[in-house]
Image (cartoon, grey):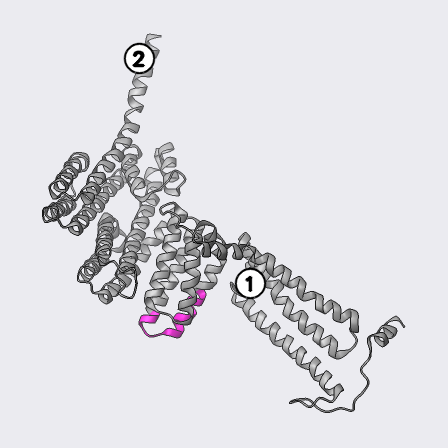
Amino acid sequence: MKRMLVSVIIILLLVAPLPAFATDKVSDWEDFTGSLEEARSLEDSEKAATAITNARNIFEKAFAKQIKGFDSTKLQIHQGLNDAVQAATNSDDQGIAIGAELAEKTTLGLVFSAFQIHIEAGNAAQAQPWFDVMAKKLKLDSNHDLVKQMDRINRNPQVTKKKGAKVIDGLTGKLAGKVAEEVDEALVAADPTSAEQDLADAKIKAAEGVAYFRAMRSQADQKLGLEEAALVAGLLDQFFNASVDENYDAALSAGTLIKQNLEVLETSKNLSESQLGKEIDNINKGLANAANQVEAGNVDDAKKTIDEGWSNFVKIEAQIRKIDAPRYVAIENIFAQIQGKPEKKNIMKLRQTFTEVAGVDSGEREVSAASTTAEIFTNFERIQPILLALLSLIGIYPIYLIYKAFGWTHKAWRNIGIFMLLLVVPVFMETLGRLGVELQIPALQVLSFTANEFAKMAWVLLVLIAFLFAISGLRSFCQQFGVKAVGVRALPEEPFPAPEEIEEKTSV
């Protein structure tokens, strides 16, 4: 009995430290970032400097001493903290925010490097606490694919190196997405044509973009190569300096190039994205091309690219509408603007809105508050298939009346009936197509002329044929009644059959 008790105690001692260590790492991160956030919120410069000093002490104890090497990265972190302290001394709130962001995200990069070292060494247990910090910062919940992947690695440590490489790629993609997101937000805040322009916020967002790239710099060096990674780093410096100098055009140009270079890394986050996130990512890539086409003066090509983006959006609009109605309405409105008049700033704004929707889908962002207008608009979209079905049924009724009144033997009325029938067919198609959009059935989606180019061609062809039948039927009427009109040949008047005569002929 005594031996059994000793064995149980030993097992508990072996197992207990790991969860405690993992929890402590997240706790250390929260203390570190909490001190930086406190410094940003304090109005007293001396207290703000003290909070930053406290953050420095936590960094040294919890991160710097436990992660060997990476001296240049640690130097960058200290530089950010020093800049924040100096800004606090000068009562410079913006300087504190920029220094704190650079220090925080660069520390995240140090954490990421520690995680990668343990994964590549095949040690899942020691990698887990560093992953927990990454998951905390990137807001990855327990249902996230990367979190589930780490759980599988811990249950089967033999696959740590192989499966862990995919987790590293996924985290790299998430950080690349963060860089692009901060760049987009900085451009929106710096937009001189916007009523919500906030230059101070634009500078802070630009600093966050720089800092997030620092967090993934070692992975960028491996994935992109040293030269291209250095190019992106240089572009980010240009972007930040242009934001500080309030040079919007230069910031926009640098920001576009940054996102193009990061796209190869962003595709890595597909591991951690839902299907909706992947669809949004594809749309955003097309919009990036459209923005480049506009900048190059190829407006017609940009319009075609935007139309393709619209068709792809229609296929997932029901999903977007369910998770974030206000942003869905915003996407509809911006698309309407750029389809008629493509402008780079609006295309970038649309990309940002799609990115925000992807963030809501992954749980990284909050759902925006819905206005009454947005609620009315989205409710109408939900019942649209029912309304279209009713229109289809209503459209059949006049055809039924023509048949009952005049039969189907009189050429003029028959052609008018076919004309009306052909006009109803596209409504039926759109009804099924919209139902496919709502229920996410691709086979039905192809029938919607808003989602499929072939359906649009079929709709145009059906309308053309319908008009030809209408012309034929109405010309017959004009000829019989001796009406003079363009394209109508006069014929000897013949009596027009009454409904009773038609009924008699039919009965015979």
At 48% from the left and 56% from the top, the residue drawn is 317
User: How many angstroms separate mark 1 from mark 2 (CA)?
Assistant: 71 Å
- Total marks shown come to 2
Magenta region: 293-308
Q: Outermost residue toward the front?
A: 372
Q: Position of residue 177 (x, y in %)?
A: 32, 52
- Left or right, 70 with respect to 476, comes to left
Secondary structure of the residue carrying tag 1 is loop
The image shows residue 318, relative to residue 74, as above or below, that is below
Q: Outermost residue toward the top?
A: 1
Q: Which residue is mark 2?
A: 6
Taking the magenta stretch, the answer to whether it contains residue 302 is: yes
Residue in the foreground of this view, choosing between 152 and 380: 380
Image quadrant of residue 477?
bottom right
| Residue type highlighted by circle 2 | Val
Q: For residue 448, which numbered disc appears in the image?
A: 1
| Residue type highlighted by circle 1 | Ser
